[in-house]
Each structure stands twice: as C-alpha cells, then as structure tokens.
Image (tube, rainbow, N blue to C red):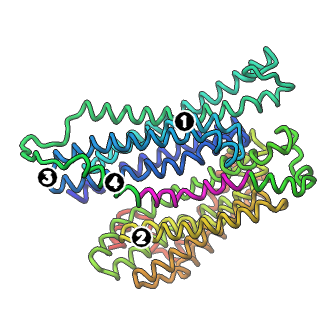
C-alpha cells in the first residue's frame, strides 16, 4: 500500500508540476511580447525583492508543517496535529503580514537605490500581498501533505498557474491598450502629456508590468480560497474512535515551528541568490559600461536606444530582456530534466538508509546517466538553435531577441552543470547533509557576484557577462557537489566516463539538424521546418545511442525496465 501511495503521490505532483511549467511558459512568453524588455525589467524587479522575502517567510513552511503533522499522525496524536495547524496558520500568517509590510514600506527605496529602477515601484507594491497569501496557503498545503494527501496541493498549483496566466495576460493587454487609446484620444496617458506614441507606450509600461505582477497576488488569493473551501467542506482527518485529547501548549508548538523554519528558510534564500544578484548588478553595471564607452552602445544598440527613449532606459531594457526572455526559455529544460532525475531519489535514500553503498552508488549512477542522456541533446540543441527558437517565440520583439541570442547560447552550454548540481543537492538532502548545498550555493553565488560586476561592466561584453558568470557558477556548484559527494559517501563515481556517448550523440544530433535547417529548409524561420529539423536530429540521436549502448538505453528509457535496472 505504501508503494502504491508513493507512486500515486509522485504521479500527481509530476502532472501538476508539468502543467504548471507549461502554463507558466505560456504566460511569460506572450507577456514579453506584450510589454517588451523594458516592461519585463519592471516585472523582474518586483520578483527580485519578492523572491528573497518569500524564501525567508513562506518557502520553508510546507516542509516544516509536513514534518510536524506526519510525526504527530505517526504517534496517533490527531488532536495535536489540528492544534499545530491552528497555531501555524496564525503564526505564519503574522510572519507573512510582516513580510508584506516590509516590501510595501521599502518599495520606494528598493526601486531607487537597489534596483536602480524607479518605475518598478508599482510592480513591487502589486506583488507584496502575495507573501501573506503564500504563507497562509503553504500552511494548508503542508497540512494535507503531512497526511500523505498530495491532491489538494496539486489542484491548487494548477488553478494558481492558470489564474496567473489568464489574469496577467488579460490585465497587461487591457492596460496597454487603454494607455494607447488614451493617448490617441487626449494626447496623454493617465494625465501625463506624451510627445509621441512611443513615449506614451513607455509611460504605460510600468502600469502594464504592475498589472501583470498583480496576477501573482490574485492567483495566490484564489489558491488560498480553494484550500480554505476544501478545509471547510470536507471532513477532518481525526478518526471517530480517537480518544487522544492531549495537546501541547501554543508556546511550545510556536517555538518548535520557528526553530525548524530557520534553517529551511536560510537554505531557500541561498538557492534564490542568483536572481537577486542579477537584479542588483546588471542595471548598474550596464549603466556604468554605457558611461564608460557610450559610443560603443550608440553604434551597437542604436535601434534599441532610439526605440526606448535613450541610453538611460537601455540598462533596464537589457536586464528585462535577459531575465524575461533568455532565462525564461533556458529554464524550460532544467524543469524537465529535474523531474526525470528525481524519480530515482526515493531508491537512493532507501539504499543510503540501509547502508548499502553498492546499491547507493549504482542507483546514483543511473540518475547521472539519465541527466546526460536527457540533458545534453536538449541543452546543446537549444544552444545551436538559439536564434531560431527566440525568433519563433518572440517574433514581434526583434530588439529583445537580438540582446538575448548570445546569452541564451552561453546559458545552454552550461545547462548540464545546472542539472548535475540540482541532482547532487537533492542527494545531499535525502542523505541528511542539507548544509552542503547551502555552502556550495554561497560559494557559487560569490563567484557569480564577482564575475557579474567585472564582466557586465565591460562595454564589449555587457549583458553577456551575466550569462558567463551564471555558467561559471553552475560549473562551480556541479564540480563542488561532485567532489563533496565522493568525500561524504566514500564512493568514486567516474562521472566523465558517463558523458562520452551522450555528448557525442548530442553533437551529431545537433550537427545533423543544423545541416537540414541550412541546406534543406534554407534557414526559414518557420515553426514547421524547425520541428522537422528537431525530429530528424532526435532520430539520429537515438539511433546513435541504440547502436552504442542498446541494452542499457532500454533500461533507462523504459519505465518498467528502469525499475528493475536500478534494483
């Protein structure tokens, strides 16, 4: 029954995450086409302050609640689990309220002096209530998951992502069109007189971005309402014949919750440092680079400067394009490869707990090989076809595409490092060494911060420096995780030997697809020829793998045989 329950929960979470990722991509890609790189700069500014505050207040709440509820259920203390829910709802609601107030009160200072983007203040205020709402909904998610019921969390996640996409795109479009109509009718936008339509669109962008960000708050509210309705309409989990009436004091429960939240919150903050570093360095460093060699930027980005009201807006435009276009497209691959790799983590944890190093090593090797087999063709394909992918997805934003082609290529080249480091971090967590991912993340973040400052400030490198520093940070995390894992487990994994065949197959795959794109389809930027090229490359990839390692390939890609293979 436990295995069936685990399989069911895994399937539920996998499907909900997959749907959420797809809907999320369907939200951010059209949103960028609506508000452009400058608007995405304001959007990303709001997320940059929201992310660390969310990590500190809400990200670790489900983990803490799950642990507390599950522990009490295992001991038959159902009444105490209900009290934990009540205390946690009040306690984390208070913490979330403080987080919301902190964002609101510091929004002006943050936008002006940290993000170097005064117009982003509206988006920051719009996202602030999400902290409170996330804290409250996270308590209820953790409560149900503590009872081994993943369905409420999965359903709420899907509803939340759909609501965010529908409301965000609708509101951003309405505000943009409203501003355009206001200018055409009165020559002004929201009371601000504008000299031209371009100036009018520039004036309306902060409000359009704020409307898009407000959808995050709305979706979190919908999620909370769904969780509360579910709690009110369905019976509680306390058995009728339960005679347990003992409960701990509110103070004891509260102290324990806070004590367990602190290390989880610190780990969450460390993991989310990368986007915060980009936000505090990219706009300022690009502004410095412009002041250092304005003629270079005037020649290199003349069309963008003319379209976006001068070089003063260029730094925010490039930052928004990088985070809203390059990062968005790049992160689609690790979302997929990460889900594939995590499927074997329970078996890895079981082997470690049983002290079976041989099985532990064998099962981890399967995960690493899977990362290479799935990751290499996707990342190298993204690098090879970066211009084509961006032009198809963002056909109406040629300026944003021109800024992001090289950064996306660089990020994709280092994508395998991200997949490996994520796998190593997950393994450290399941074997009880949660301190190692925090240390490695802090080191890699320090490397990224230093490289961002030095590289982005060079005019000839500019925004590409952020992608280079990210690649190096991923490599540091992957290499550090690999070495630490060998030291902690006392096992040698010989990771380089697993790379050869998937890497060669991926290079052949990409080379074949590129040849077809260039000579058969004549570099046409159309979706169907691109899909055909990808299909041909994929076929070549699997043929090469099948010839090279037919038996093991079947075990890795066939779900039923993979289970037998890892046993």
Which numbered disc flags the more N-terminal residue, 3 or 2?
3
- In the depicted view, which residue is nearer to us: 86 or 551? 86
**The N terminus, quarter of image:** bottom left
Can residue 140 be seen here?
Answer: no
Could you tell me how far apart the alpha carbons at marks 4 and 3 are, in whole angstroms? 19 Å
Q: Main secondary structure of the magenta part?
A: helix
Of mark 2 and mark 4, the one earlier in the sequence is 4
> Viewer-nearest of labels 4 and 1?
4
Residue 491, image x and y in percent? 42, 84
* Residue 165, disc: 1
Q: Earlier in the sequence, mark 1 or mark 3?
A: 3
Residues under labels 2 and 1: Cα distance? Answer: 34 Å
Labelled pair 4, 1 in contact (Cβ < 8 Å): no
CA gap, disc 4 to disc 1? 29 Å
* 182 in the magenta segment: no
Left or right of 283: which side holds 531? Answer: left
User: Mark 3: which secondary structure?
Assistant: loop
Mark 2–mark 4 Cα distance, whole angstroms, equals: 18 Å
Q: In screen coordinates, is 234 left or right of 511?
A: left
| Mark 4, residue position | 64
Q: Earlier in the sequence, mark 4 or mark 1?
A: 4
Q: Magenta stretch: give its range.
A: 264-283
Q: Which mark is residue 428?
A: 2
For label 3, the crowd category at 10 Å Cα-Cα, with few meaning under 14, some 14 to 19 and many 20 or more, is some
Q: Secondary structure at mark 1?
A: helix
| Up/down of 6 relative to 38, above or below | below
- Secondary structure, mark 4, is helix
Left or right, 138 with reference to 24: left
Q: Are marks 4 and 3 in contact (CB under 8 Å)?
A: no
Depicted 437 relative to depicted 487: above or below: above
Q: Earlier in the sequence, mark 4 or mark 3?
A: 4
Kindly identify which residue carries mark 3: 76
């Amino acid at each position: 029954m436990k295995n069936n329950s685990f399989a069911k929960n895994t399937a539920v979470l996998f499907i909900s995450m997959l749907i959420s990722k797809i809907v999320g991509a369907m939200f951010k890609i059209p949103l960028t086409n609506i508000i452009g790189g400058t608007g995405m700069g304001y959007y990303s500014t709001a997320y940059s302050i929201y992310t660390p505050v969310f990590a500190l207040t809400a990200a670790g709440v489900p983990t803490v609640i799950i642990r507390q509820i599950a522990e009490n259920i295992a001991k038959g203390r159902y009444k105490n689990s209900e009290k934990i829910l009540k205390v946690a709802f009040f306690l984390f609601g208070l913490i979330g309220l403080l987080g919301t107030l902190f964002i609101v009160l510091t929004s002006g200072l943050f936008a002006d002096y940290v993000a170097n983007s005064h117009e982003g203040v509206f988006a920051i205020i719009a996202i602030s209530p999400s902290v409170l709402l996330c804290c409250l909904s996270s308590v209820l998610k953790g409560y149900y998951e503590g009872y081994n019921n993943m369905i409420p969390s999965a359903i709420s996640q899907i509803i939340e992502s759909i609501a965010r996409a529908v409301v965000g795109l609708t509101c951003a479009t309405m505000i943009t069109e409203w501003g355009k109509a206001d200018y055409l009718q009165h020559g002004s936008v929201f009371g601000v007189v504008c000299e031209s339509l371009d100036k009018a669109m520039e004036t309306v962008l902060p409000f359009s971005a704020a409307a898009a960000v407000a959808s995050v708050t709305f979706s979190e509210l919908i999620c909370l309402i769904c969780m509360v309705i579910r709690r009110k309409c369905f019976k509680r989990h306390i058995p009728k014949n339960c005679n347990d009436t003992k409960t701990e004091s509110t103070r004891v429960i509260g102290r324990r919750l806070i004590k367990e939240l602190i290390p989880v919150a610190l780990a969450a903050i460390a993991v989310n440092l990368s986007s915060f570093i980009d936000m505090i360095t990219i706009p300022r460093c690009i502004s410095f680079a412009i002041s250092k060699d304005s003629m270079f930027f005037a020649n290199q980005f003349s069309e963008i400067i003319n379209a976006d009201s001068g070089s003063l807006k260029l730094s925010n435009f490039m930052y928004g394009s990088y985070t809203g276009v390059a990062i968005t497209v790049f992160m689609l691959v690790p979302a997929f490869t990460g889900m594939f790799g995590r499927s074997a983590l329970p078996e890895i944890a079981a082997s470690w707990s049983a002290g079976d190093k041989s099985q532990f090593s064998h099962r981890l090797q399967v995960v690493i090989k899977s990362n290479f087999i799935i990751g290499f063709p996707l990342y190298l394909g993204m690098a090879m076809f970066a211009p084509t992918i961006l032009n198809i997805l963002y056909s109406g934003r040629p300026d944003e595409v021109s800024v992001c082609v090289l950064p996306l290529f660089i990020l994709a080249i280092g994508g395998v490092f991200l997949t490996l480091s994520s796998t190593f971090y997950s393994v450290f967590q399941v074997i009880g060494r949660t301190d190692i991912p925090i240390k490695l993340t802090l080191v890699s973040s320090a490397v990224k911060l230093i490289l961002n400052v030095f590289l982005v400030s060079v005019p000839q490198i500019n925004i590409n420096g952020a992608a280079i520093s990210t690649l190096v940070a991923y490599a540091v995390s992957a290499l550090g995780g690999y070495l630490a894992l060998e030291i902690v487990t006392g096992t040698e994994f010989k990771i380089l030997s697993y790379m050869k065949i998937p890497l060669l197959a991926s290079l052949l795959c990409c080379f074949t697809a590129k040849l077809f794109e260039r000579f058969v389809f004549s570099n046409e930027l159309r979706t169907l020829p691109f899909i055909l090229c990808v299909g041909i490359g994929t076929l070549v990839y699997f043929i090469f793998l099948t010839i090279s390692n037919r038996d093991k390939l079947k075990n890795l890609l066939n779900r039923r045989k993979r289970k037998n293979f890892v046993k």
